[in-house]
Image (cartoon, rainbow, N blue to C red):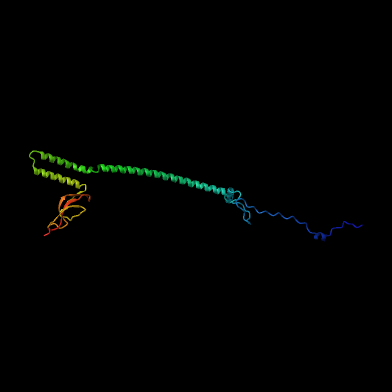
Amino acid sequence: MKNNNTAADPAASQSAPAPEQPAAAATPAPAPNDTGCQPAKGDAPSSPSSDDTAAASKNPACPGKTQPADAAQSAVLAMAAELATAKKEAADNYDRYVRAVADHENFRRRALREKDEIRLYAASRVLEDLFPIIEALALGINAAKAPGADSATLVNGMTMVLDQFKTALAGHGLKEIHPEGEKFDPNHHEAIATQPSADVPEGNIIQVFRTGYALNGRVLRPAAVIVSSGPAAA
């Protein structure tokens, strides 16, 4: 009998195909997270730095980026700070406005009070200068009443009182308008008549009928005058 248990042929054993190895499972690509963070292709993993660690603590899902919620919270805090600053500025402006209104009201009242005082007491200085004149007139009247009064002395006394009175008024800006012989000026003179004259040129003043007065250059009363019409017709 033949032995069926023959030795295996070495060539046959070498030519027999080797059993196939199972294919390695493909590494799935990382899916993008909700924040759109995805690692770049071809980047080799590296040890995290301190900045990356801090960023990762802010956003564990996407290291190095800030979560939208954190950005919104920062914006809200910034707006709240701006609002607080604006409120403070508004309060300061209102306080300054109230103070300005109060100052203006005080100034208005003070101006009205001073105006009333000026109106009531403006003539006080003039009256004070008239006191000596009043006293001089009283003395002159008493002297005229005395028996044997000299008329010449009385006239001289009244003349002195009149000069004193004019001096007092001139000290307050009052000036006489006595334009005899001057050119007629309708701004300062009032013509009450015309009269021919061979000596006074036409348009000049022959005679002052009533003295005029001006206060600091402003005419209070024009002088009433007679104006020359030139030589009389032959």
Question: Which quadrant does the N terminus fall into?
Answer: bottom right
Q: Quadrant of residue 112?
A: top left
Q: Is residue 151 left or right of residue 16?
A: left
How many marks the image carries: the answer is 0
Q: Nearer the viewer, residue 91 or 15?
A: 91
Residue at 29% in and 43% down = 115
Furthest toward the left, the residue is: 148
Residue at 35% in and 43% down = 105
- Residue 40 x, y percent position in the rendering: 62, 55
Q: Is residue 45 left or right of residue 112?
A: right
- Residue 206 x, y percent position in the rendering: 14, 54
Furthest toward the front, the residue is: 234
Vertical position of residue 19 compared to residue 133: above or below: below
- Residue 143 x, y percent position in the rendering: 11, 40
Residue at 13% in and 40% down = 141
Q: Nearer the viewer, residue 220 or 52?
A: 220
- Residue 49 x, y percent position in the rendering: 59, 51
Q: Nearer the viewer, residue 26 or 138?
A: 138
Question: Which quadrant does the C terminus fall into?
Answer: bottom left
Q: Is residue 2 left or right of residue 174?
A: right
Q: Is residue 146 left or right of residue 87?
A: left
Residue at 9% in and 43% down = 151
